[in-house]
Image (cartoon, rainbow, N blue to C red):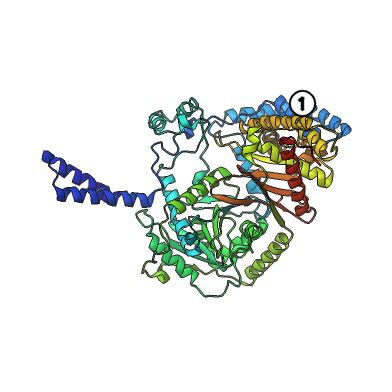
Amino acid sequence: MANLLAVQARITLTKQGNIINPTTSTALRIALREYSTSDGKEYLHRSIVPTMHYQKSLPRLPVPKLEDTIRRYLAAQKPLLNDEQYSTTEKLAQSFQNGVGKQLHEELVTQDKNNKHTSYISAPWFDMYLSSRDSVVLNFNPFMSFNPDPKPEYNDQLLRATNMVCSAVRFMKTLRAGLLEPEVFHLNPAKSDTDGFKKLIRWVPSSISWFGAFMVNAYPLDMSQYFRLFNSTRIPKPGRDELYTNDKGRHLMVMRKGHVYVFDVVDADGNLLSPAEIQAHLKHILSDESPAAAFPVGVLTSENRDIWAALREKLVAAGNGETLGLVDSALFCLSLDDEAMRDHIHISHNMLHGDGLNRWYDKSFTIVLAKDAQAAINFEHSWGDGVAVLRFQNEVFKDTTERPMVGPGSQPAAVDSASAVRRLDFKLDAGLEAGISKAKENFDAAVSKLKIDAIQFMKGGKNQLKKVKLSPDAVVQLSFQMGFLRQYGQTVATYESCSTAAFKHGRTETIRPATVHTKRCAEAFVQQPGKHSVAELQGLLNECSKYHGQLTKEAAMGQGFDRHLFAMRYLANSKGMALPELYQDPAYAAINHNILSTSTLTSPAVNLGGFAPVVPDGFGVGYGVHDEWVGCNVSTYPDRNVHEFLQCVHKSLEDIFAVLEGKPIS
């Protein structure tokens, strides 16, 4: 502000009498440069459209028609059931539609009309996450790893940590100042993603701004989750956790060797600390030669939530209230690991769960930096979905690689880091130490069962599929159906996550990729080789693609069936009603036992993404369809063979691309 006032004063002085002498002109240029540099240090960019400009006018997530939900539900059940099972499920679904389901649907619609500030799924979805007593590790927290910095000399742990902290704080400041570019999905960027359109739309009142974007085929996305990115933590409570945010916190939380350190990264005026000082403080932490924490409190965040809640109460009673408050209100967590990564499998294990000692899994997100500067984000899932975290990751990657604040020649500031950095010491009694030891034991037992493997299919990708007008996502999802059929001879419940962020307080909807079309196609490729011509197989691929595209559009528009059925079941439970028969049907349990749980991610910032299976006998399938190749990063437990599954997926992709080239399959 001081620099800006100086600029304004000098402009005023130089305008008097229309005289600008060389000295004044030079001073003005210096002042302008100072202001530009200062402002550039504080913000990533200055959007001319305010960050939350579209939020007020976002459309509301529709409650689907009950008959549409039942029709979609039965269509998804068809490939999973035999004729007798399907007949039973069909009768139960129709009885639900004409009876108790009709009543629940009408109540849900009424409830939705009375809560126009939010969506019908928002509260039940928060409750589902926060009421779960399972550990957040493996069950909920996913990871997304950063690509390395394209400049090799910047892939240094201290340099990258400093730059990422600076960029993260700049993102936070840009967001809170309302200067972060709104999140918009552009179907016609040439019309909507232009300075001209932005200059126009910023003058359209927020109450109708969404419609202005819609007119040029642009779809603003919900940004209500973004405020939970910083200064936020999931607090364990008996029965149901709470989300805590305290935006007054100015400090960063750093973990190393199981110890927790804090230091301010924002000064009293709200400005980013000098990058050289941040570098000095991080160097001080990396230079701490103390042995690893004997009883690292962070491992408690990996426990069953009720156990952790009880231990947290004991921590507070033992005099750790203020210390926990510093953890909870920290901007975010930075975990500095002392181990270098061997390969992408090691990266996946380390970034998804690590050893449990150097993490605070309840923080809204953690930036993990290995010894060799491999980096990732691990995030707690209850507060938000991938849209907000991916935007943050993209911005941080872009900023650190294009405008790094420190470089190989940068020297840490000559400051008293020993005074500025505080290592938090937790007061522990024998009971708490026993709790920490037990948590570590439980953690080790859980993660030891997890297996991860990956493939890169290099014989084709998005470009080739688009040339033949096939949906890349549909084809890769089909390869999972074919792969599982090849390995196990079955078609099983499959989940693909789809964001509903195009609506106010939207969360996610489920795409159900296992369909009668994929089953028919998979059987033709896998179980009936030689019985179908290349043209017939190409026709089957086309059917799969069209239907998958329809399912994807429906889900993105809030027209799936999973969230609607979930919300009605939640409503029945909240009213103390007997559970309707539809929900007691073994087929309902089976379709929600998602053996194939899948999620896709492609971004210039992201190298790998992954999560654990959602059921003990399942696969957690993270995948990306790139221009010329397909990548899959898959996790499982001992009930399944992940290496064999990926070989079957690879063979399936080979067969699909061979058929698309007009070759018969062998």
- Judge left or right: residue 81 versus residue 319: right
What x and y, as percent, mark residue 657?
71, 39
Q: Taking 112 as reference, is 173 above or below it?
A: below
What x and y, as percent, mark residue 31?
24, 50
Amino acid type, residue under disc 1 in the picture: Gly
Residue lying at 52% horizontally and 57% vertically, measured from the top left: 328
What x and y, as percent, mark residue 280?
41, 66
- Judge left or right: residue 146 versus residue 83: left
Number of marks: 1
- Judge left or right: residue 294 versus residue 333: right
Residue lying at 76% horizontally and 43% vertically, measured from the top left: 652
What x and y, as percent, mark residue 408?
43, 63
Q: Name the one closer to the observer, 654 or 471.
A: 654
Residue 581 shows in the view: no
The single residue placed furthest to the left in the displayed view is 17
Q: Residues within 10 Å of mark 1 (few under 14, many from 20)?
A: few
Residue lying at 83% horizontally and 28% vertically, measured from the top left: 91
Point out the image quarter for the C terminus.
top right
Q: Name the one closer to the observer, 537 or 187.
A: 537
- Asked which quadrant contains residue 512, the reply is top right
- Asked which quadrant contains residue 137, the reply is bottom right
Q: Secondary structure at mark 1?
A: loop
Residue position marked by numbered label 1 in the rendering: 99
